[in-house]
Amino acid sequence: MNKTESLKKKLLGTPYFIWSVIFILVPLGMVFYYGLTDRSGVFTLANVLAISTPEHSKALWIALFLSVIATVICLLLAYPLAMILSRQKNGRQSFIVLIFILPMWMNFLLRTLAWQTLLEKTGVINSILEFLHLPALNIINTPYAIILGMVYNFLPFMVLPIYNALSKIDINVINAARDLGANGLQVFLKITLPLSIPGIISGITMVFIPALTTFVISKLLGGSKILLIGNVIEEEFTQASNWHLGSGLSIVLMLFIIINMLLTAAFDKDGEGSFL
Amino acid sequence: MKKLLCLALSLLFVLSLLTGCGNSAGKNGEVIVFNWGEYIDPETLSLFEKETGIKVVYEEFDTNETMYPKVETGASAYDVICPSDYMIQKMIDNNLLAEINFDNIPNIKNIGEQYFEQSKEFDPENKYSVPYCFGTVGILYNKTMVSDPVDSWSILWDEKYADNILMQDSVRDAFMVALKLNGFSMNTLDESQLQAAKNSLIEQKPLVQAYVIDQVRDKMIGDEAALGVIYSGEAIYTQRENENLEYVVPKEGTNVWIDSWVIPKNAPNKENAEKFIDFMCRDDIALMNFEYITYSTPNVAAQALIEDEDIKNSKIAFPDLSQYENLETFQYLGSEGDDLYNSLWKEVKSE
Amino acid sequence: MKRNILQKIYIALIFIFLYAPIVTLIVLSFNGSRTRAKWGGFTLKWYSALFQNRDILQALFNTLLIALIASIVSTIIGTIACIAIMNLKKKSRAIVMGITNIPMINAEIVTGISLMLLFISLGLRFGLGTILLSHITFCIPYVILSVMPRMQQINPYTYEAALDLGAGPVYGFFKVVFPDILPGVLSGFLMAFTMSLDDFIITHFTKGAGVDTLSTKIYTEVKKGIKPEMYALSTIIFLTVLTLLFLVNRVPSENQEKKGA
């Protein structure tokens, strides 16, 4: 390929390169600018260090704690599901997978709100339990309800990458292992699991980050009684109008995202476990 | 996949035809209104559009605190806003409001003089605001669930009603309850008083079912909770829907508030804004709004038009404020005061 | 055999978990009472009320319009960008891909806030335009990430052969390269469309006065009690998508594509 041809092709990317500078890099730069200055525009680390005050660090720890639990539950639920799905006949496979994505077409706020209706003190589940003379389930407005909301909303993001990784596994490899005398558990531990690690890692990222940073689920299912770091940041911007503090806390949040990215990169060098 | 796409696209096309393009502005321009949720009879908006040819762009907020940053940044320009007393004072202090030309609002005569008098607390020269609704804050309780007499804020700290209490999810309202409980002014900046209030709120938190705003109404109607802190205007509506509910103004005193129409400085359609305010002050329109939202109207002419004698003489709709002591109106406490309240509130919420 | 039954039970349980809220919403859309706490008998009135409700229809229109424009624009920009990225040296390609990944990996709340800060400092009037710009921004990465793998699988020599045989670059691209990457482009488009449709957080920070999408409309309504018309609308949307899915699956697709959107 000659040079001018290649140059021309590179030029084709100009709109996107300009776009990504203006709408990705500059805005991020502004978050850093606000986060590292005070109201009079003087450099300060106070907004970032504000994370160490009891109310902020508590919100961060709760968010971390709940999102880790939600991620683990998602993984435990999704892995067997993805395995079962990947073993279906080809024709049915895509249909069943779509069935599991279908709820995503229902607005995410409405779905979460529906859980409110289900879980409420006089809600659907409790009415059924009462009818069966079983003790009532009181988890609305508690951390359990928030975890449930996280698992519910982000489960498909765990199923899909694992499913993609599993369906890429060559059945001949598994057959060969069996021929060589491996039992079911050995096949799983030595072949299936290692080959699906990229999917697991990408699933963890896709679930953990939105769960860590959510403010909607805690608001709807936690009755505004439990403050997550996402709620703190949202309120700094929409209510307290202290953008500097909000940006400073966002920088802290991004640190966790970067840590997560580095971990991901260490496990998944070729980007195999992509969501798509 | 291709087929799915074709189907999706054709569906989209049909839908867009169906919903039509309601985007075009009215022949006399538009007016952008920023109001509380469920705070107007939508019918009055269409009437206004029909009579004036001005298109109403309507947007809602849920607390004064969420409204303010949107106006302050100037990112979206509004023509008419309906904040409460202390927030109006804050907006005046920060130079965000335009003076209203009262010559363009002849219907102002319908508004009772005493309400303008009351407005002087936050708008000393009555230059910036036109009263829209007023009322108190109190406790709404369910008679079947609460056996004790309800006359004090302290019942919200009674462990008998654990997980049956709804608190307001906004800084000033929540602190008002706690400050009044402790016998302090709700406009205090005294550190020790605020700490005491904060501790009361933290002590109360395990008993609270949820911190909500407008949802108090639906939850109380649905028997979800026994006690809730609520604005007086909601009381009549909720009683209509659930006859077991009763509204009380606690003896320790409470907040008397006024929500008024104001016009921000950067309003793109100031003349239309004044037309809108004038329209809202018309007696028949104010009556429609009163009957729909059941919040007390300062519109004396509209009060006279109310046919239902029970409502007309209702102590809830038109309270005799002289019978209560310790009534106060919120005041703007400066940006440092705001920060103080916000950080204390965050401590309560993160506990 | 036993294992098979266990698997079926497991799938059924997850299925119930995923669909319980949706069934609830559908049931609520037929509830005669205005509050969701009480059952007021079966009714269809919310469906007729829905078509009278200008606000909700306008929000639906906005949502679809934004999703459509954002996904088309991001598909075009993204696909073209892929051609360019393929021709970059390894190092610069890594940098560009790194930047591309940011909106996908970053927290939505941070993306939303950063765009809000940008628009304010540019002095833009918040409205449909700012929502569109933000949606295009977070949609492009999905397009690039689904087109790139296809692009990498293409044999570069077929394109060069086409050029040698006298095809112009554009003609050559559409005749030789485009058919090969089409599945990637389509799934990128659908992905972008879905993401835009379901977005709430970024829209929440970049929307302006009186311009609502379904998500932001619902969010305002959540605080004061959802109007039952909204349940009716989501039931209609859900059933439409479900029907589409069945239709597509009954007619065997000509180009069997295993990976869904």
Image (spheres, grey):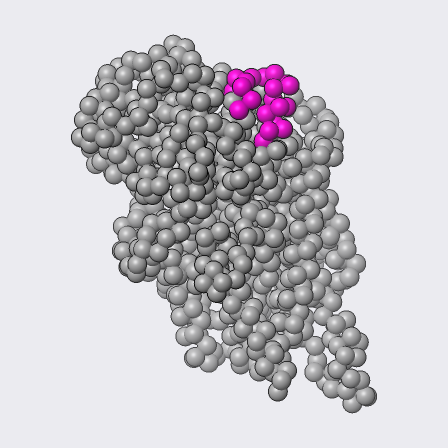
Q: Is residue B84 magenta?
A: no
Dividing the picture into quadrants, the one containing residue C40 is bottom left
Residue B329 is situated, as x and y percent measured from the top left of the image, at 44, 18
Work out whether residue B219 or residue A105 is closer to the camera in this orientation and state it: B219
Number of marks present in the image shown? 0
Task: Residue at 38% x, 9% y: name it.
Answer: B125
- On screen, residue A124 versus residue C58, left or right, reads right
Q: Which residues are magenta?
A: B181-201
Task: Residue at 71% x, 38% y: name it.
Answer: A57
- Residue at the right extreme? A180
Residue B325 appears in the rendering: yes
Residue A73 is situated, as x and y percent measured from the top left of the image, at 66, 61
The image shows residue C129, relative to residue A185, as above or below, that is above
Residue B13 appears in the rendering: no
Q: Quadrant of the C terminus of chain B?
A: top right
Dividing the picture into quadrants, the one containing residue A255 is top right
Work out whether residue B276 or residue B322 is closer to the camera in this orientation and state it: B322
- Residue at the bottom extreme? A179
Task: Residue at 75% x, 62% y: name it.
Answer: A268
The image shows residue B42, relative to residue A155, as above or below, that is above
Residue B62 is situated, as x and y percent measured from the top left of the image, at 45, 35
